[in-house]
Each structure stands twice: as structure tokens, then as C-alpha cells.
Image (cartoon, helix red, strand yellow):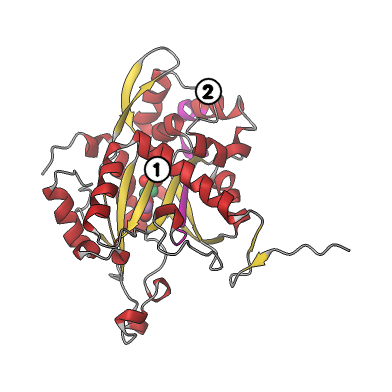
Amino acid sequence: GVSMSTNRDSHGSSSQVAEPFFRSVLGQMETVYLNRNPTPKSVLELVRSVDDDEQLCYDHLAFRTFGIGGYGIESLASFFLDYGYTQMDELRFPAKKLRALWFAPPHASSAVPGGSGVNGPLPRVFISELLVEQMSTETQDVIRKYTETSPNGRKYAALSSALGSLPWEKPLSSEFEQLAKESEYAAWTLANGYALNHVTISVHRLKSHLNKIKKLNQFLEEKGFKLNSEGGVLKVSPDGGLLQSSTVADSISFKFSDGVTKSIPCSYIEFAERLVLPQFQNVPESEIKECHRRDGFEVGNADKIFESTNQEQLSRRTG
Ligand code: OOG
Ligand code: NI
């Protein structure tokens, strides 16, 4: 008989999708993101221009979803799981009525030598979902209206993200406002759908002096970029090993189905520095790999990074 073989990696996960196809889908998601968001585009160009090596690695990609009717985390996660990603920890945000899961890339994947961005080492993936059943009935009604009239849209989450097309119809401006009053995350997701919420630059893997997040933050602020100041610009995990910061989201002009055009929050770019774990302090610097560093995410950091798309951060004055 015919023996079917798949590439099994050390997590025991197997790939059912060819790598060139997988990377080109990530590349399309990134293209949509860069075309809509001038700040991430210029930050990436600037950091690349300072970095001698031209290699820039993504720490993770992040997406938002509605946790209802099959439209939640799993709708988009299936694409990454099919490529061999492994589901890791759950993070809960009770006050924001959100939860998230992160996914680790397969070890087997062969990054193009010297490849940058989506052609470099594969990023982690962070997908969150709104706990829709915990919202007011008015908000639930709006979310159900759009998800229920496109019930199979959830099957094309990755396609929707790569095309930059909503999997449901465009909402009314009043519906966007209704959601924004209760959850800015909900309003964002209604209007932006599965579009890439942010990419994160792996700061410790930069070759230039910008490979320390404090230096990078200072450099970006000097160049006039506005960073999310919620709880302080630098977010540090309690163990001290995960340091993160982000820009404030760009705004895009969005035409609602009632003909009203409004400027609404779109995407941002994040920065993450992962320090070497205490048990690997003696490993020579030249032998340090990503696996020797603090892995995963941190609820306290994430809680504040979510606010990068909130009106309060967007309307803040620089400085
Ligand atoms: C995600 C915020 C959290 C992180 O790295 O902890 C996050 C979002 O804004 O959707 O990106
Ligand atoms: Ni992030």
C-alpha cells in the first residue's frame, strides 16, 4: 500500500501543510498589515536600516477573535496546528472578558538562511478571544448578527486574514459605537476581523545596539514614535525575563455600511526581549539559542499591551 509520511517534530506534532505555502500565507497577512499601518512599516524599515545584518526575527504574531459560534481561537488556530504548531498555555483576562492561547512553532522548520521576518525562524502565535456570552445582550446581539449571517465564514479565518477581508458584512457605525462603549476589543474585532493585530520584533536577536529594549524604546521615542504608556512604557514579567513594549495603534478611515466614514484603530507593532534563563547563565554567549531564553507570555504584560488599540492611548499627547 501507499505509506503516507508527514514531518513529525520533537513536540510530536506533524505538518499537513507545505512550508512554502504556509510562509506565503504569513507573507500575505504581513502585506495587508504593512499596507494599512504606516507606523509598523516605518519602524521595521528604520530598525532594519540600523541593523548591520539586515536580519530581523519576529517573536510572535497576534490575532483577535470573537469567542462564539466557532469563530473563536480555534477558527484561526487550525491553520497553525495543521502546519505543526503546538498549543501552549492559556492566559485569562477576567476584567477585559478575554482569554488567549499561544502556540509554539514546530522545531523542524527550516528558516531560509539569513531569512528575515516571515522567512526567518517561525514566530510564536498569540490568539485571543472575546468571551461573548459575558457581554451585555445589546453587544451580544450585534456580534451574533454578524457571525450568524455568515456562519461558515469561520472556516476561512486564515483566508480572511491573508486577504484583509472581513468574513462577515460591514457593520453600521452605531453598532461599532455600541461595542466600543463596552469593549474596545469587541469594536476592534468587528471592524478589523482576523487582520494581523501586530507583529513583534525579537529585540534580543537584533545585531545592532538596539538589541536591548530600553535602548530601542529610547531610540524610537527620539524618532517621534508614540509608545503605549499604560502601566509604564516597559512591561516586565514578575520573573524579570520577559520585557515588552509597543507603539500605539495607527488609525484607518473605515466606511461603515450606513455610509458613515470614521477613523478607527487598526494595528500596532510590539517589541519583546527575552532574557537568558537562570539555569543557562553559564552557557557561553555565542552558544545561546532561543530555547535558553524565557519562553511564553505574561498576563500582566499582555493586559497592558491590549490597550495599544484603545482610544485613551491613541488620543494621548506624545511625550
Ligand atoms: C494582544 C495583546 C497581548 C502580548 O504579547 O502579550 C500581547 C492584543 O492586543 O490583541 O500581544
Ligand atoms: Ni504581543
Residue bearing the label numbered 2: 169
* Mark 2 or mark 1, earlier in chain: 2
Crowding at mark 2 (Cα within 10 Å: few <14, some 14-19, many 20+): some
Magenta span covers which residues?
121-140
Which of the 4 image quadrants contains residue 260? top left
Look at the numbered disc 1 and say if its residue's Cβ is closer than 8 Å to ligand 1.
Answer: yes
Q: Specify whether 59 is left or right of 28.
A: left
**Residue lying furthest right in this view?**
1
Picture quarter with the C terminus: top left
137 in magenta: yes
Up/down of 307 relative to 262, above or below:
below
Residue 104 x %, y %: 50, 62
Q: Residue at (37%, 70%) from the top-left corner?
A: 294
Q: Is residue 237 visible?
A: no
Nearest the eye: 223 or 195: 223
Real-space Cα separation, disc 2 to disc 1, in angstroms: 20 Å
Q: Could you tell me which residue is drawn at 11 percent across and 49 percent down?
A: 222
Query: In the image, is residue 233 above or below residue 318?
Result: below
What residue does disc 1 label? 197
Report x, y in % for residue 15. Answer: 64, 59
Tell me: residue 36, above or below residue 109.
above
Residue 219 in sight: yes
